[in-house]
Image (tube, rainbow, N blue to C red):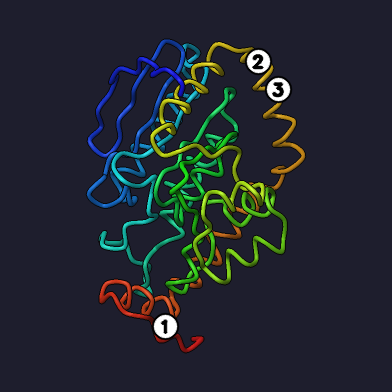
Amino acid sequence: MAADADFVLDKDLDALRLYRSGPAAKLELNRPERMNAWNEQLGVGLRDTVAELAADASVRAVLVTGAGRAFSSGADLSEPRDLTPEGHPDVYKVLTQRYHPIITGIRTMAKPVVAAVHGAAAGIGLSLALACDLVVASESAYFLLAFVNIGLVPDGGSSLLVPSRVGFARAAELAMLGERLPSRQALEWGLINRVWPDSELMPQAEELTVRLANGPTRSYAGSKRQLNAWLYGRMHDQLELEAQVQQEMAGSQDFAEGVAAFRDKRLPAFTGR
């Protein structure tokens, strides 16, 4: 087992905590009572902190993880939502103003970013993990494109980030069946990079981040530019398409039924409308 890295709390934003260990930073989602589901406070804090870390030359590698028993269960469906003039949730605004800057900020950050996943990485939580350069996970972790289960479509870049890692066939399966993908299978599919026993995840992930933080930072940044140019050259267009399609879905009867079923803890009765 790797030795523990010395990460010290640097900033506490309530829903988000930032730790530092020399040139390495650890960003911890901190809503454990909600399995780190994203509300406005977490989303805005994450957006702003990602921008700060990108601009801070003293930070040379970043680790993203979650407090408690999950990486992130996705969007918090209990949070009050802004509405469009038609009375539908304004998901376009949330995606374009809050979520997209996080995803693009990580992808364009001129330093490596590692995601350490335990428990669930679902919905926008999965998008966050896959936006990172390296994804490591515990043996009990799982990955879930949960959107279809409430009548929505992949967003947060996952319609691009998933197929770029696993190909069309497997991406379609994850998007349309909405089933959990255990970490070992995710590793076999090429969705993630490494799997460790649960007790070893954080020590190993922290050691990896410190290693990267003490490595050739400009080389890492150059590799990211190359990979982004080849795989994600149309990321902004795809994010815009996701937001537009998701806004269409937010006005559907199936979405309303999906959210109601989720809150009532029952199976949804979709009608295709």
Q: Using a 10 Å C-alpha cutoff, classify the residue at mark 3 as few (fewer than 14 neighbours), some (14 to 19) or many (20 or more).
A: few
The kind of residue tagged 1 is Gln
Residue bearing mark 1: 253
In 3D space, how far apart are the residues under numbered discs 1 and 3 (Cα atoms)?
A: 46 Å
CA–CA distance in space, label 1 to label 2: 49 Å
Task: Please tell me whether residue 208 is drawn above or below residue 178 in the rendered image.
Answer: above
Q: Mark 3 to mark 2: distance in Å?
A: 6 Å
Classed neighbour count for the residue bearing mark 2: other residues with Cα under 10 Å, few (<14), some (14–19), many (≥20)? few
Asked whether 88 or 159 is in front, the reply is 159
For image coordinates 75% across by 30% down, the residue present is 226
Taking the spot 26% from the left edge, 62% from the top edge, the residue there is 78
Q: Amino acid at mark 3?
A: Gly
Give the residue pinned by disc 2. Answer: 218
Q: Which mark is residue 130?
A: none
Q: Residue furthest bottom?
A: 271
Q: Residue at x 35, y 14 (%)?
A: 6
Query: In the image, 237: left or right of 60?
Result: right
From the top left corner, tell me how far across and down residue 225 is, in percent. 70, 29
What secondary structure is found at the residue carrying circle 2? helix
Q: Mark 1 or mark 3: name the one nearer the start of the chain.
A: 3
In-front residue for pair 174/244: 174
- Residue 163, compared with residue 15, is above or below; it is below
| Residue located beneath label 3 in the image | 222
Say whether marks 3 and 2 touch (CB < 8 Å): yes
Place of residue 262 in the rendered image (x, y in percent of width and height, measured from the top left): 32, 72
Secondary structure at numbered mark 1 = helix
